[in-house]
Amino acid sequence: MRLPALSFLLPALLLASCGSAPREAAVPASYSPAHLLTVSVTSSQGDADLVARYGGQVVLRTSTFAVIGDPRNSLSAQRTQGSSVGANRGVFKATGAVGLWGNGAVGLWGNGAVGLWGNGAVGLWGNGAVGLWGNGAENFWADGQYTALPANSEAWKSIGLERAYQQARQFGKDITVAVIDTGVDVDHPMFQGRLSDPSTWYDFVDGDSLPQEAGTAGEGEFGHGTVIAGIAAQIAPNAQFMPLRVLDPQGGGDVLNVAAAIVWAADHGADVINLSLGASEPVPAIAAALAYANGKGVVVAAAAGNSGQASLDYPASSFANSLLNVSVGSVSSSGIHSTFSSHGKDLQLNAPGETIVGPFPGERAAQWTGTSMSTPVVAGALALGLGEGRTPRSAVSALKATAVSVDTVAGNEAYTGLLGLGRLALDAYTAPE
């Protein structure tokens, strides 16, 4: 989830799954079932067996679970399967916007921090940041400033990124981060040479192989996925990024697409999955898809949400005891809890999520705020650790073990015990053991 400047994204997510012989997870865009049933499967059960039992159509299949669209009798199936039937269409919602473009991003483009990029974006990428990206992460810092995108200097210093770069050697090399979101501007200069092989891309909204951002600047959630990928790339600059589009330009999407994208990512070489989206309650299909991905050693970072309440969005709310998944809240560069950030006893980690600058479609950059922004910081950190040789479990456990508590930071008194293990400390995370 993210708040580009002053608005927040609060998608409500739902998911389901199905079974039979494993097959590609791509879902035809022409078929969007109203309801989904998630069931566990064995290798001996074929699609025909499932359809005969439940009706409907098998729309997603792995070796462990299957998702059935529009089962014959949803209520009966729900009783049989333990409340695993749910709605599919438009369950992801981008709600609660606070006039981001009216007095947030547009104002920034016109006369604030993003005004720097508004009048010189091409020059920035052509002569500055792109050159830095091409010459290695060790060149990103000079005199205490993050020279690729200076506006992020304080945020990145707060998590020890400069020191981490001095200690790291691979910077996420050979690690792939799947960005499941609104798509990515695949032509943006920042991503030159940094996207996974095009054969691993997919647009689950349009049902094609080009997950390009769609929409118009200033409307809805246009640019959301692009900035997410760009933030993760600032933390792990040698990683590869796999764009998977599941949300429309307004930030809405179907459950089936999200579940299919998680499976797709796991089957196409992702090591890390970033989910800057969420749901208001648990979703069986998402749970099954995440278990499938974790079974392949994939680690997941998910946004806590932007409700400002003491309850997390799903699936972040289910990660409290996970060895491979991390829920992420937002703090300022000073470690102060972001008022919009969801929190609670299930929260695990926090990262900077306020006014973070990242790439924006059209060779531009923009400044965004929200737990959508803090989440790819953690996804990038996981890629950084994996690139240095950590196993999936040790990458997650070390990130938690080295976090610094923010409970005693002035301003956080009301949130004691509700801010998880604290804020990332990448200098300690990458320190030689």
Image: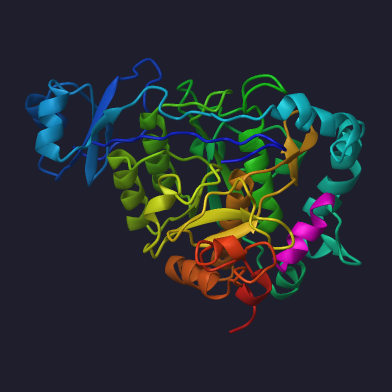
What is the quadrant of residue 113 in the picture? top right
In-front residue for pair 37/245: 37
Tell me if residue 24 comes above or below residue 193 in the rendering: above
Instruction: Tell me the residue at 63%/44% (across/down).
Output: 370
Query: Is residue 250 depicted above or below 104 in this figure?
Result: above
Q: Which residue is drawn at 47% across and 57% down?
A: 344
Residue at the extreme top = 30
> Residue 336 or 35: which is nearer the viewer?
336
Residue positioned 69% across, 19% down in the render:
216
Magenta span:
151-160
| Residue 109, above or below 350 | above
* Quadrant in the picture for residue 325: bottom left
- Image quadrant containing the N terminus: top right
Above or below, 421 relative to 202 = below
Give the residue drawn at x 48%, y 51%. Answer: 310
> At which x and y percent is residue 368?
71, 40
Depth check: give the residue in front, 237 or 86. Answer: 86
* Residue 141 locus on image (x, y percent): 84, 63
Q: Kindly report the secondary structure that dominates the magenta region of the rendered protein.
A: helix
Q: In this view, does 119 lie to the left or right of 225?
A: right
Total numbered circles? 0
Q: Quadrant of the C terminus?
A: bottom right
In the image: residue 131, left or right of residue 15: right
Residue 86 image offset from top left, x and y in percent: 27, 30
Q: Does the magenta stretch include residue 86?
A: no
What is the x, y in percent for residue 296?
36, 56
Residue 157: say if magenta. Answer: yes
Determine if residue 162 is in view.
Answer: yes
Residue 120 or residue 34, whichever sits in front: 34
- Res 283 → quadrant: top left
